[in-house]
Amino acid sequence: MNIELNETHNPSLKSWVLSANMKDCDFPIQNLPFGVFKDTIGHHVGIAIGDQILDISKAHQLGLFTDESLKAAEHCLKGSLEPLMSLESKYWSAIRLTVSSLLREGCALRNKVETCLVEAKNVEMLLPCRIGDFTDFFTSIHHATNAGKLMRPDSPLMPNFKHLPVAYHSRSSSIFASGTKVLRPHGQFKAKDQELPSFGPSRRLDFELELGFFIGKSNSIGSPIQLSEAEDHVFGMCLLNDWSARDIQAWEYQPLGPFLGKSFLTTISPWIITLEALRPFRISSLKRSSQDPALLPYLIDLNDQKFGGLDIQLEVSIQSQNMKEKNIAPQSITKSSFADQYWSIFQMVTHHTVNGCNLNTGDLIGSGTVSGPNEGESGCFLEMTQGGSKPITLKDGSERRFLEDGDEIMFAAKCKHATHTTIGFGECRGIIYPNN
Ligand code: MN
């Protein structure tokens, strides 16, 4: 367990990139997330700072890295984060420390470093790495209870929920970066009063508010990752929208689980917030009450209970096409907290590998829909509108049970703490289009 703070977390640090020092900036010098951007020359690994991106390959060319940070930078030259992610975490820390020093107020090399910056608004963000596999969990007890109530009012939670983090294996080919068009999927569905299924565009298109995390160091097949070591295998986190067609999902899911109702698209925020940047926001993961069943030993670790949780505040906003045309600002429809999760991301890693399954560098793991215990904290429409029976009203007066064409969904995440600098996750957005 490594949650010690170091000089890169110091809240008094300021950057000579002035936009990074603005209040509410997602990418202050204490964050330094990794991503991949595309310009006219090709794909490059970068680190976000304010509204700028530090191009690692340019900084490497100028000889700004030495020792362990040099090895780390050399693993960033292929336009993908996989090589860096596959290294030991000390190399991730080394490049973070060097970049932090280069971007600090008063850095003597500022003039050189300045030539390595590109404006974020002038480049396109890509996926950070090749994502081989994508597993989506189901770890919010509030989401599991509220969604379960719609189907089983008397026993909403499935009997396994408190014993293991439930998951299904999802599709990696259809994961795209924020901003990708969301084409309304077509498929089969059957309403309860219909005798036979029909085919057409989904009428119950939904978002799912989730966090994702990327596997850094892999494990070999047959070698489970112990809970005490799970942290060493997680590179960092992003926002994840697991778009879901509820009507397709409801008809197809038995007995093997979600398939085409989910696999048409998943959108992620393109910047990976490293576990090191998240250290100041680690909290207890222990959400179990004395009435909850005891855990099996492989899911118990004292450090995980003390520090396995993450205090990340999430928010969803919507802006319909009509709102856009009338200049009505996006409307916040949900706020929830990752602090409320029943299972930690480290328990997810350990459970995923306990049977000997190997996780590869670049694999993406989703947390499942993050909902809170109160009203206004639902991580999807299914829950918020109780299966579409209680529509919400938007600022332009229109109602929503599920998503309509032209709607834009935006996720945001912030980590806030009284004595630490606020960091954010950047954008995860998508607009719904008909697929004609
Ligand atoms: Mn999901």
Image (tube, rainbow, N blue to C red):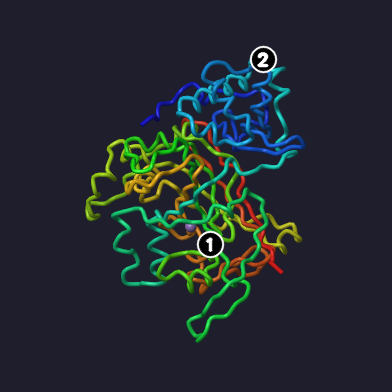
Q: Where, quadrant-wise, is the N terminus in this rendering?
A: top left
Say if disc 1 is inside 8 Å of ligand 1. yes
Q: Amino acid at mark 1?
A: Lys
Of all residues, the one furthest to the top in this rendering is 108
Contact between marks 2 and 1 (CB within 8 A): the answer is no
Q: Judge from the rendering whether residue 22 lies leftward or rightward of residue 293; answer left or right.
A: right
- Does residue 148 lie above or below 428 as drawn? below
Vertically, is 195 above or below 271?
below
Residue extending furthest front? Answer: 221
Which residue occupies 56% across, 23% down? 13
Label 1 sits on a secondary structure element that is loop
Between marks 2 and 1 in the image, the one whose residue lies nearer the viewer: 1
Q: Nearer the viewer, residue 433 or 214?
A: 214
Residue for point 31% across, 41% down:
305
Q: CA distance from mark 2 to mark 1?
A: 48 Å
Q: What's under tag 2, amino acid-wise?
A: Leu
State the image coordinates of residue 46 (x, y, percent, origin top left).
63, 32
Residue 34 in percent (x, y) is at 58, 34
- Residue pointed to by mark 2: 109
Tell me the quarter of the picture where residue 82 sits.
top right
**Residue 399 appears in the rendering:** yes
Image coordinates for residue 50, horizontal then vertical, percent: 65, 33
SS at mark 2? loop
291 lies left or right of 239: left
**Quick one: label 2 or label 1, which is nearer the N terminus?**
2
- The circle on residue 262 is 1
Density class for disc 2 (Cα within 10 Å; few <14, some 14-19, many ≥20) is few
Q: Position of residue 114 (x, y in %)?
A: 71, 22
